[in-house]
Image (cartoon, helix red, strand yellow):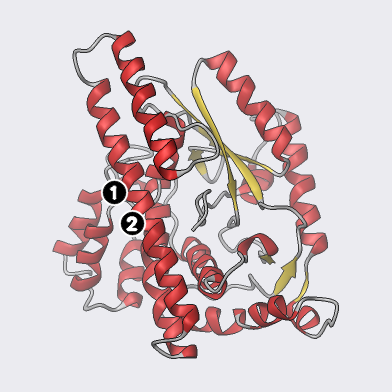
């Protein structure tokens, strides 16, 4: 699976609707509102797209699968919403570009705070050049590592009817599985979302979607379908890549806590991240913001798996259990190590 990460989510519309004047630069709110309007304006009903001979047959077939994907997710306990009933061809490679920032010699992540949705470890821009310019200003003015990465989709938590986006559909046989995975991932956000807990929210959505995608593919295509095999292969490569990024995060975290001088830490860090960039064939530099961004996804899977088994491997029970969590169940905002919270649910018998 090609870089950048496939499942990024950014709650832009929530910010647009909830942020009072003065909470963030006016140019951000203006571009966010304009970008969201552009997507909604471009969206057409799926039924219209499916019947349009001007739309490539491959896209029409994939869009036609969305009803089945949503129905399967809802049968497993995901919230029923009006999302993904329309399709928008964005004519660009990403839905949004996320800007993230982090201290250069620690994993102290820069947060942006908004009413309603709380703090987030990123802000999203609909225009890549604008995102890059903003990232450069943060880097220079705050002396932080910054990273800009593309996101194929974002969620508004079901507050509006999110359309299927052309950016959610990659090339290759894995496209059907990828589309299903994104729809299921974003549907988890609409089902269970904890304010100020990005790592928990994203990791929960990844865990659930990753484990529902293959069963859905098998149910509609059979257990040995080429599309299922292609998606499983691509997802395994993605997970291996994510594990490598997480391991480098841990390696650098230990370095930053060591007795080495700052000069030594910078030199060692530069050597480690450049080797990782070459190994993973990244097209952009890797820094602390890059690693912290990927750390938000795929954390706590072992604990979520224990919870799933304590819920008798029933997704409805698991989703009801996590939906009862509140911000007060966490020790701090944006808690990176949220595993104790999940383990408490498991010990409670998924009640």
Q: Can residue 16 be seen in this view?
A: yes
> Residue 88: x, y in percent?
75, 65
* Vertical side of 185 occupied by 137: above or below: above
Quadrant in which residue 65 is drawn? bottom right
* Vertical side of 70 occupied by 143: above or below: above
Quadrant in which residue 102 is drawn? top left
Q: How many labels does the image show?
A: 2
- Horizontally, residue 297 falls left or right of residue 329, namely right
> Residue 296: x, y in percent?
40, 45
* Vertical side of 324 occupied by 134: above or below: above
Which residue of the protein is positioned furthest toward the left in this rendering? Answer: 347
* Vertical side of 276 occupied by 14: above or below: below
Say which residue appears at 36% left-offset and 71% top-offset: 211
Say which mark, if any, is on residue 329.
Answer: 1
- Horizontally, residue 279 falls left or right of residue 71, namely left
Residue nearer the viewer, 179 or 161:
179
Marks 1 and 2 sit apart, C-alpha to C-alpha, by: 6 Å
Q: Can residue 75 be seen in this view?
A: no
Say which residue appears at 23% left-offset and 50% top-offset: 339
Marks 1 and 2: CB-CB under 8 Å? yes
> Residue 11: x, y in percent?
58, 50
Report which residue position mark 2 lands on: 325
Q: Residues within 10 Å of mark 1 (few under 14, many from 20)?
A: some
- Horizontally, residue 72 falls left or right of residue 49, namely left
Say which residue appears at 56% left-offset and 20% top-offset: 139
């Amino acid at each position: 699976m090609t870089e950048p990460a496939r499942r990024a989510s950014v709650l832009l519309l929530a910010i647009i609707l909830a942020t009072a004047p003065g909470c963030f630069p006016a140019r951000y709110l203006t571009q966010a509102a304009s970008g969201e309007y552009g997507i909604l304006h471009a969206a057409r009903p799926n039924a219209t797209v499916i019947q349009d001979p001007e739309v490539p047959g491959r896209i029409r077939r994939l869009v036609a699968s969305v009803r089945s994907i949503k129905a399967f997710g809802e049968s497993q306990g995901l919230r029923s919403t009006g999302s993904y009933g329309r399709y928008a061809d964005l004519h660009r490679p990403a839905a949004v570009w996320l800007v993230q920032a982090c201290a250069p010699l620690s994993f102290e992540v820069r947060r942006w705070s908004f009413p309603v949705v709380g703090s987030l470890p990123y802000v999203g821009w609909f225009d890549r050049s604008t995102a890059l310019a903003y990232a450069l200003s943060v880097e220079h003015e705050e002396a932080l590592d910054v990273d800009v990465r593309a996101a194929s989709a974002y969620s508004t938590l079901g507050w509006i009817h999110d359309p299927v986006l052309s950016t959610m559909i990659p090339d290759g046989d894995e496209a059907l599985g990828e589309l299903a995975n994104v729809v299921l991932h974003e549907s988890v956000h609409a089902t269970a979302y904890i304010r100020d807990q990005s790592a928990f929210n994203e990791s929960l959505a990844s865990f659930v979607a990753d484990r529902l995608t293959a069963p859905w593919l098998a149910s509609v295509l059979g257990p040995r379908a080429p599309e299922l095999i292609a998606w499983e292969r691509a997802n395994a490569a993605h997970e291996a890549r994510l594990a490598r990024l997480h391991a480098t995060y841990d390696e650098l975290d230990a370095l930053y806590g060591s007795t080495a001088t700052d000069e030594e830490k910078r030199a060692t860090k530069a050597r480690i991240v450049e080797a990782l960039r070459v190994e993973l064939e990244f097209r952009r530099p890797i820094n602390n913001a890059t690693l912290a961004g990927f750390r938000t996804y795929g954390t706590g899977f072992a604990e979520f798996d224990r919870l799933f088994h304590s819920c008798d491997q029933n997704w409805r029970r698991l989703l009801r259990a996590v939906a009862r969590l509140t911000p007060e169940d966490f020790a701090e905002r944006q808690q990176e190590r949220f595993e104790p919270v999940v383990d408490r649910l498991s010990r409670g018998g998924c009640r």
